[in-house]
Amino acid sequence: MMLRNICRYHRQFGQGIWPFSFPQGQHVPSLSTHLQKARYTSATTERKKFYENVSISQGEGGLYEINLDKRKLKTPGGKLFTVSNEALAIAVATEWDVQKDTLKFYTMHLTTLCNTALDNPTQRTKDQMISAALKFLETDTICYRVEEPPGLVELQRNEWDPVMNWIEQRYNVVIGSSTSIMGPQIPEETKETFRQHLNSYNFWSLTGLEYVITQLKSLVLSFGLIDRHLSVEQAVLLSRLEEEYQIQQWGNVEWVHDYDMYELRARTAAGAMFVHLSSERTAVKRKILQD
């Protein structure tokens, strides 16, 4: 079954990373470490395509499964690959459907995130994930300001201050910024407000949100993106503000800059899409599955 008319938002940014697994008994670093590096031994692995048709089906408990010809997709941990709603199932199926003669596992962001949520390889709890996300607030990209050069100082103020003002008003908190290497002192009340907000997400959505935070290195920008205050392009550009300033001043290696930018957009877009799809139980009309 061909799925080429669906999930264009995801397919616009078609790069990613492949699911991972660890040998039995091997020390497993934190999930944040893996997401931050976004590089695994298996991420460079390619394999000859072994299926022709991709479809989805609804199985036990109303969960959706991915079928590669007559085979059921499984996670790296050996579990049956299942998702809670049809929209997410279609998005994952699209990742498999668009593969050509060679499977490029590093292009499958949503598959990776689903596998992470299903296998939970580091066995973390929801509270641990929330604490990890809040850690980023202490080193948030847009909280750290420079004192020079004047052009970058002005750029940070003009571009970052509106986002900071938005989130402080949106959540009724105080964050602030600092030129000190220690960063601003985040009030405990602010952390508690964000903790309660993060607790409103389910485990799967938190998996996607943490992935976005890791890409942007900013809790503030990630909230702006998930709350639809910022677009993917805006969030990525704001996360790379200093780098973009340096490029404007000194130039760049043409294809390297573009490749890095599109890669970051791809990962960020997939993470944001995963958060929203994991927060819903949606039924998608069957007709959109038709080629």
Image (cartoon, rainbow, N blue to C red):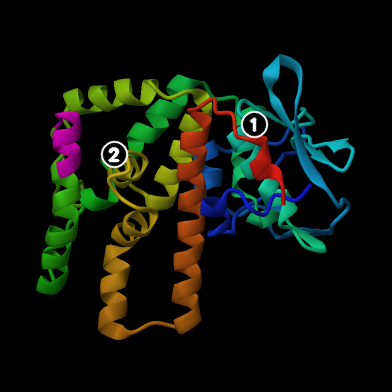
Instruction: Tell me if residue 100 comes above or below residue 25 in the rendering.
Output: below
Q: Is residue 150 left or right of residue 92?
A: left
The amino acid type, in three-letter code, at marker 1 is Pro
Q: Is residue 286 left or right of residue 188?
A: right
Is residue 28 visible in the rendered image? The answer is: no
Judging depth in this view, the residue of 90 and 36 nearest the camera is 90
Does 85 appear in magenta? no
Q: Residue 272, located in which quarter of the rendered image?
A: top left
| Residue lying at 47% horizontally and 51% vertically, measured from the top left | 269
Q: Is residue 24 left or right of residue 126?
A: right
Secondary structure beneath label 1:
loop
Residue 121, numbered circle: 1
Sequence order check, earlier mark of 1 and 2: 1
Does 172 appear in magenta? yes
Is residue 151 visible in the rendered image? The answer is: yes
Q: What percent of the width, then of the height, locates residue 151?
A: 13, 73
Judging depth in this view, the residue of 163 and 214 nearest the camera is 163
| Residue lying at 33% horizontally and 62% vertically, measured from the top left | 237
- How would you rate the neighbour count of disc 1 (Cα within 10 Å): few for under 14, some for 14-19, many for 20 or more? some
The amino acid type, in three-letter code, at marker 2 is Leu
Query: Range of the magenta residues?
Result: 166-173
Q: What percent of the width, then of the height, locates residue 60?
A: 75, 17
Residue 137, numbered circle: 2
Instruction: Tell me if residue 100 comes above or below residue 139 in the rendering.
Output: below
| Residue lying at 54% horizontally and 25% vertically, measured from the top left | 281
- How would you rate the neighbour count of disc 2 (Cα within 10 Å): few for under 14, some for 14-19, many for 20 or more? many
Q: What percent of the width, then of the height, locates residue 165?
A: 13, 44
Q: Principal SS element in the magenta part?
A: helix
Check contact, mark 1 vs mark 2: CB within 8 A: no
| Residue lying at 33% horizontally and 54% vertically, measured from the top left | 235
Q: CA distance from mark 1 to mark 2?
A: 25 Å
Q: What percent of the width, then of the height, locates residue 150?
A: 9, 72
